[in-house]
Amino acid sequence: MSQFFPDTPGYRQLRERFLQAATQAGATLSEYSHPLTGPFGETLFTDVAWLGAPDAKRVLVALSGTHGVEGYYGSDCQSRWLESLNGRALPDGVAVLMIHLINPWGTAWMRRVNEDNLDQNRNYLDFSKPLPDNRAYRDVHAIYACEQLQGPQRDKADALFNAAIAERGWSGLMSVVEAGQYAFADGLFYGGAGPSWSNRTLRSIVEKHLSGVDVAACFDLHTGAGDYGHPMLMSIVESAYPALDDAKALFGPWLFTLITGANKVSATGVAATSTGYTSQMLLDALPGVHLMPFVIECGTYAGDLVHGHLRDDHWLHLHGDPLDETGRKIKQGLLEQFYPADPDWQEMVWIRTRQVWERALAALPGIRA
């Protein structure tokens, strides 16, 4: 069990279960070692499992842990599905690629961000070009730079926060904050100053395993936005892509297509104003692949509640101690926001994720490249 909480699996347990399930299913495994360690000195890895013929030209990809703490849901579903695939024959010419915890530091430390305090889904950019300039964030950064969890500085930050909501409305403020920003490394939704370890690692995995395939369906696994217990199936991209019609035909009204941009809005709880999403990077990196990039986003709690826990965790890693009593309490609260302990929630998101994967697996042989 986790050294953070006795009744909760930790990074080591998530990894051990995944490796065991992949091995028993007959997958070929590879690992990518992270340069840093977890909070208890544990070594960290992104693990990759390929199940199926090595020359398969149609691949179902499942990616977990883009936002570290959200990897609890993703890892659980990956391991469960590998366990269910043990002894089953895949469709001819189809393989399954599991990318387990692409941000292992974030999962181990129970953070949504990575070791550089950056949001992976704001980091997949071309850093040789000018970065997005989220000037409006400058006006609210002081909210997130507060050095106190409680006390007069926090009261002042809360007053600024409430004033910003009064001025912009909740959705207006979140469209600014969640859009991502590249000026404040100590800020929220920071996109980084260059490609992160996870960014570089995912590009290496994609190049190795997917550059030569014909058709791929990739599912990036997330939690925290949307209605409680409701897994949204989405395609989050900057513009329509060649395989979009196939994606819509495959999932019909289940699929919600979110086109991102500076002035875009969304009622899904997922930021439409941000850039640097994984899905768009995959499309750009694999121009020769008939790729359907999906996101499964599992709703948990109300957005204002989730955001409050993100603020506390942000303070913790800037100014607190994740391993003291206050730190552990904050970690427990954050984990609940992104992976509720409610067994019915956990079962519901697994059932729906499995349904989505099974439908895609069965359909892949018939999708024309």
Image: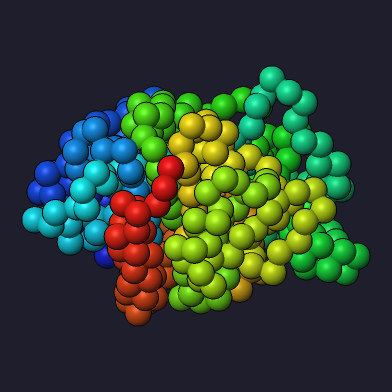
25 vs 342, left or right, is: left
Relative image position of residue 85 (x, y in whole percent): 17, 57
Relative image position of residue 310 (x, y in whole percent): 59, 57
Relative image position of residue 109 (x, y in whole percent): 42, 45
What is the quadrant of residue 280 in the picture?
Answer: top right
Relative image position of residue 33 (x, y in whole percent): 32, 27
Give the total of numbered labels: 0
Residue 21, relative to residue 7: is it above or below? above
Chosen colour scheme: rainbow
What is the quadrant of residue 101 in the picture?
Answer: top left
280 vs 230, left or right, is: right
Image quarter where the N terminus lies is bottom left
- Residue 141 shows up from this direction: yes
- Residue 220 shows up from this direction: no
- Determine the residue positioned at 13% across, 49% down: 25
- Determine the residue positioned at 27% across, 65% down: 7
Image quarter where the C terminus lies is top left
- Determine the residue positioned at 33% across, 72% down: 351
Closer to the camera, 166 or 369? 369
Q: Residue furthest top?
A: 128
Residue 79, relative to residue 298: is it above or below? above
Residue 344, relative to residue 266: is it above or below? below
Closer to the camera, 208 or 19? 208
- Determine the residue positioned at 57% across, 33% down: 284
What is the quadrant of residue 38 in the picture?
Answer: top left
Q: Residue furthest bottom?
A: 344
4 vs 156, left or right, is: left
